[in-house]
């Protein structure tokens, strides 16, 4: 398959060169002679030149692909770093929120304990007053 393509490329190149030679503005005075069939050496030279051109094109294409891959890799790294930075920022915000909630929970616990203590003291005081009133009403209490 590659040989067929090479032969076709050589024949196309020779045909193009023959057409250019026939259409040149060179010696128009003489009658054009029919183009001679290319020799094996000419065909080899054309094939070698074609191979060199193809190699150069392939090298250029490979270099372009490598550059594009490097650019894509750099963009991926930048995106990963940006995402990591955003994740760190979000994590720190969550940590701050959790710390604030913890502080508020401690404050609420302390306030609830204080309120329960106040309620307990009020009940104790009320019970003592009620007991004293009952004792005074029955007559067993100290009259003060």
Image (spheres, rainbow, N blue to C red):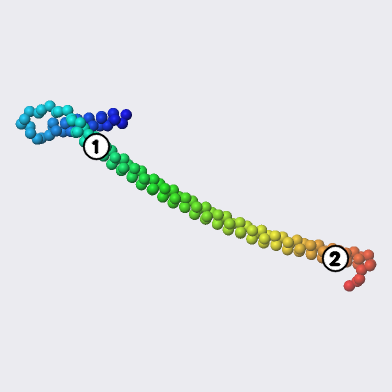
> Quadrant location of the N terminus?
top left
Which residue is nearer to you in this view: 36 or 31? 36
Q: Residue furthest right?
A: 139
> Which numbered marker is on residue 48?
1
Please state the horizontal and vertical placement of residue 96, each as a whole percent of the image: 58, 58
Secondary structure, mark 1, is: helix
Which residue is nearer to you in this view: 97 or 71? 71
> Which numbered marker is on residue 117?
none
Q: Look at mark 2 in the image and give the residue it sits on.
A: 128
Residue at screen point 72% across, 60% down: 112
Q: Earlier in the sequence, mark 1 or mark 2?
A: 1
Q: Quadrant of residue 12?
A: top left
Please state the horizontal and vertical placement of residue 4, each as a whole percent of the image: 28, 28
> Quadrant location of the C terminus?
bottom right
The answer to whether residue 16 is left or right of residue 134 is left
Instruction: Tell whether label 2 touches label 1 (CB within 8 Å).
Output: no
Residue at screen point 13% across, 31% down: 22
User: In this rendering, does residue 70 appear at all?
Assistant: yes
Residue at screen point 67% across, 60% down: 106
The answer to whether residue 85 is left or right of residue 69 is right
Please state the horizontal and vertical placement of residue 104, each as a whole percent of the image: 64, 59
């Amino acid at each position: 398959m590659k040989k067929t393509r090479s032969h076709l490329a050589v024949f196309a190149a020779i045909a193009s060169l023959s057409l250019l030679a026939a259409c040149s503005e060179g010696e128009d005075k003489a009658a054009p002679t029919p183009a001679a069939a290319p020799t094996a050496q000419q065909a080899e030279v054309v094939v070698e030149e074609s191979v060199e051109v193809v190699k150069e094109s392939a090298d250029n294409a490979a270099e372009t692909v490598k550059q594009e891959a490097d650019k894509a890799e750099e963009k991926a790294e930048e995106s990963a770093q940006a995402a990591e930075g955003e994740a760190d920022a979000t994590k720190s915000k969550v940590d701050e929120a959790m710390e604030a909630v913890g502080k508020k929970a401690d404050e609420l616990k302390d306030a609830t304990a204080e309120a329960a203590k106040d309620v307990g003291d009020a009940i104790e005081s009320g019970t003592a007053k009620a007991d004293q009133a009952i004792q005074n009403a029955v007559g067993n209490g100290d009259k003060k």
